Amino acid sequence: MTTAIIGGGVAGVAAAIAAAERGERVLVLERNRKPLKKLGVTGNGRGNVLNSGLPVYFGGERFARAALARVGYPELCTFFTSLGVPLRQEAEGRMYPAALQASVVTEALLLRAAQRNVTFVLNTRAQSIERAGDGFVIRAVQADPLPETGAPRKAAVPAAERPINLQADRVIVTVGGAASPAQGTDGTGYGLLTAFGHSVTPLKPALCALLTDKRRLAGLSGQRVRAGLTLYNANGVQLRQTEGEVLFGDDAVSGIAAMQLARFYEAGASLALDFRPAIGQDGAAPPQLCAFLQSLADLRRDRIVGDWLTGAFAPPVARLILSEAGLWEPKRELVRLTSADVERAAVTVAGLRLPVLGTRGFEQAQVTAGGICTEDFDPETMQSLLCPGLYAAGEVLDVDGDCGGFNLMFAFSSGLLAGRGPNGR
């Protein structure tokens, strides 16, 4: 039996290994010059591959949980052990290769694929999948590889492409989503499955920065602070809440806590930042927070407002808080602060509100929210319920998770299930 896998990312290579271990002849079509390109940059290059905590998924949440019930955290740990990749756990259940380098996972996966005689057909873009008797024909185009050395090919001169047709008994589609097109996942692969009657849910960038009014972030680029974040819709209804490190950019709020809100963005949304965690006042009631801020002012009664929050916040963050509270008069004497001034500062510390103008978009998103609807797939095998012999796994499906290894975890799980075929073994 020949199994063709379209897409050489994590789900595709996991599926290839599982299928080859069943004795199948496996072909992996990959549009890039090498497989597993996206894996190399995950977790800032450290490779956050799994999470030992409770699964956090959106979109086809039930589907993801059903898949993980078949191949979940314990079995995936065993899979990594079988590859010779020891793991280490860090905060919030995040699992990394012990070497803290995503490259070691890439190398171990490709070595196992080579051991199982998996064939990679590189620089190849699948254009369609067609039924042919009991099997399939994949129509694709293959580009001439770019030279490894020498001057790069000019963008204006496209690589020569030639059509190729490949036959397979079953096909597994693991082309990824629409996020990170620079890594080869640009959303063009959905049509391979919609041609068989599958539908695509609305697509949105997930795990990316939130854009805001850059005038209000002046001087904050590069500043980090721990905060609670709440995203509200245009009517003031809470959409989602997170907590963690915030990273300010020239025109955006980033960091994991902010990026996890991107998939919930709606037009007219606003972001509330609660800075109490940054000063050890987590959840402090207004009187308690006012007392703390007043104590800082009392320590510096001989100084000016510009010195008020010294030691509690970095100067750019302190200026943001005081400016948003309407108190940025840096030369004003602290002894002239009123109780109303302190209350205004406390309100701002506990809930500074910024407009959200959009997200960074698919170009800088780590994951796609939305994708091929999961209702027409069997979560125990990843096989299409509309076309026997056709499978899908990974980000091409409408499954996305929080930061922390959940997305790669589903990619590995669903890939292994698809590779095992209808018997699930």
Image (cartoon, grey):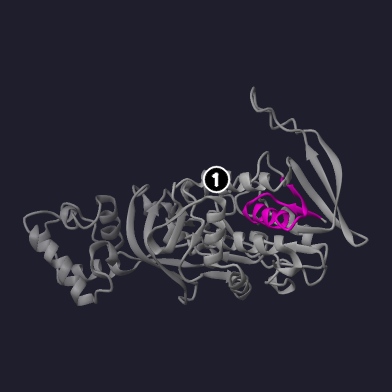
Give the residue number, with chain letter if any, for mark 1. Answer: 40
Instruction: Give left or right: position of 260 versus 287.
Output: right
Up the image or down, 58 lies above or below 335; here it is below
Residue, far right: 133
Look at 54% across and 48% down and name the residue there.
Answer: 105
Give the total number of marks visible in the rendering: 1
Residue, far top: 150
Question: Is 15 in the magenta?
Answer: yes
Q: Quick check: can you spot residue 357? A: no
Look at 8% across and 60% down and name the residue there.
Answer: 299
* Amino acid found under the numbered disc labelled 1: Gly
Question: Is 5 in the magenta?
Answer: yes
In depth, the one of 363 and 400 nearer the eye is 400
Instruction: Give left or right: position of 311 versus 101.
Output: left
Identify the image quadrant of the N terminus.
bottom right
- Choose top left, top right, bottom left or bottom right for residue 408: bottom right
Residue, far left: 302
Identify the image quadrant of the C terminus.
bottom right
- Report the span colored magenta: 2-30
Instruction: Give left or right: position of 319 versus 422.
Output: left
- Choose top left, top right, bottom left or bottom right for residue 107: top right
In depth, the one of 290 and 191 nearer the eye is 191
